Amino acid sequence: MIKKLPKTNDSELFNGAGGETESWHAFEIMAEFVSATEKLKEITPAVSIFGSARTKQGHPYYQLTQEIARALSDAGFSVISGGGPGIMEAANKGAFAGVGPSVGLNIELPFEQHGNGFQDIDIKFKYFFMRKVMFVKYAGAYVVMPGGFGTLDELMEAITLVQTGKSRKIPIILVCKDFWAGLLDWLKNTLVHEGMASAQDMELIQLIDDPKEIVEAIFKHYELTGFELTPAERKMQLYL
């Protein structure tokens, strides 16, 4: 038998024994969305760069990320990173020295994450899913450097959104071929072989290590359509 919930007033909902309720968090989510949208709506064309927060300065991955971000920035792109240390810092640092804006989508975490000092636009998020929406919503391409679980999460989300038609098709570029070789072999030899993904899905991914070639690949993708969203794509982005 379903029990009736006790009656409460608005004050009890917000300040009751259990503290804030889930429904009240909706207002925080709305505030994050509105604030981020206002700050990011003018940054296109933009490229999101992902990679490990644990990569140290001086590491080849760090140096390469900085070069890629600088090349993208000088080509007129805004560069979006997670705003933290490691690869994120390298991306912001490279873009900060270039022409296009350096954007950091920072997340509140109990460890690892702290904002780097190379951000023209600094946005802080409490909610992971809202931050992930912004990475996709304003990116014309994904550049994915070596990274851990968070990087893999972003990569798979991007592939899934494009593959299912929930997002427009954008270049998804993996950098450092040796690092990604094992994953790509597994995707082809297991997922595709078992029929859980199609061979066409693998075509969504590009492997490019040279910064200049990465910039060229992104421009090539948009040379016929341009970077401006069509009305249909704008509507699609509303339902990410």
Image (tube, grey):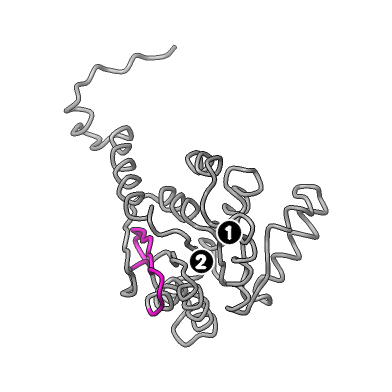
For this view, does 174 lie left or right of residue 15?
right
Residue 213 drawn at (x, y percent): 63, 76
> Which secondary structure lies at badge 2?
strand
Q: What residue do we see at 32% from left, 59% from top?
A: 123
Residue annotated with mark 1: 155
Q: Residue at x 20, y 31 (%)?
A: 16
Q: Residue 22, located in which quarter of the rendered image?
A: top left
Q: Indicate left or right for 32 with 69 as reference.
A: left
Q: Quadrant of residue 186?
A: bottom right
Q: Residues within 10 Å of mark 2 (few under 14, many from 20)?
A: many
56 over 180 or under it: above or below? below
Helix, strand or loop at mark 1: helix
Disc tally is 2
Front one among 124 and 172: 172
Q: Earlier in the sequence, mark 2 or mark 1?
A: 2
**Magenta span has 208?**
no
**How far from the left and from the top, in percent, is residue 206?**
68, 66
Q: Residue at x 51, y 61 (%)?
A: 150
Q: Amino acid at mark 1?
A: Leu
Which residue in the protein does label 2 denote?
50
Viewer-side residue, 181 vs 202: 202
Q: Are marks 2 and 1 in contact (CB under 8 Å)?
A: yes
The amino acid at mark 2 is Phe
Q: Using a 10 Å C-alpha cutoff, classify the residue at mark 1 as few (fewer than 14 neighbours), some (14 to 19) or many (20 or more).
A: many
Which range of residues does the magenta coloring cover? 97-114
- The residues tagged by marks 2 and 1 sit, at their Cα atoms, a distance apart of 8 Å
